[in-house]
Amino acid sequence: MVLITMNIIADMSIVFPVPGNFVEHTFRWLDPSFSFAIWLALLTIAGVEGTTFAIIVRYWDTENVVPIAALIAALIAIFLITVLTVQLSPTEFFVEFKYGTSAIKVAALITMVIACFAIMGGAGP
């Protein structure tokens, strides 16, 4: 089902390109109010991601070096500013950023696979 939906969105983007993102597609093909609802949902998801990021980092801070409220507020602010900066940047920068992070992911995966085989071969502690 996801593959079919992605193919349909790709076909719509090729035949009728819009100067924006998925929200522009909903504005053009469905309804402006539905477009606003999707934008609001994406904004809500960004807040949830920021809170989740802070909770994960707080889990690592076992010694409670920084006061919890200040830590969470600072981490959420830094995370959301970073995400919004990348998302609202020009397309060329966004593509380069995504390319760089994808290269880091591929390098990490290759490193983990090599480490896994090395540990299975007896190179562990």
Image (cartoon, helix red, strand yellow):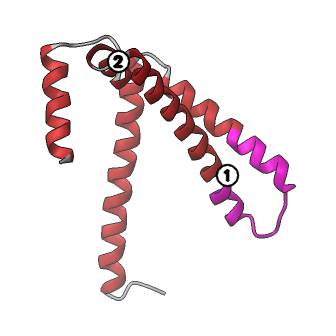
Amino acid type of the residue that numbered disc 1 sits on in the rendered structure: Ala
In terms of sequence position, does the residue under pointer 1 or pointer 2 come before the other? 2
According to the image, label 2 marks what residue?
31
Horizontal arrangement in the rendering, residue 121 relative to residue 16 (left or right): right
Amino acid type of the residue that numbered disc 2 sits on in the rendered structure: Asp
Q: Residue at x 70, y 36 (%)?
A: 77
Horizontal arrangement in the rendering, residue 28 relative to residue 44 (left or right): left
Q: Residue at x 79, y 50 (%)?
A: 71
According to the image, label 1 marks what residue?
54
Horizontal arrangement in the rendering, residue 36 relative to residue 112 (left or right): right
Question: Residue 44, position in %: x, y?
Answer: 56, 37
Question: Residue 82, position in %: x, y?
Answer: 59, 32
- On whether residue 106 falls in the magenta region, the answer is no
Q: Residue at x 49, y 87 (%)?
A: 125
Disc 1 to disc 2: CB gap under 8 Å: no
Question: Residue 78, position in %: x, y?
Answer: 68, 37
Helix, strand or loop under label 1: helix
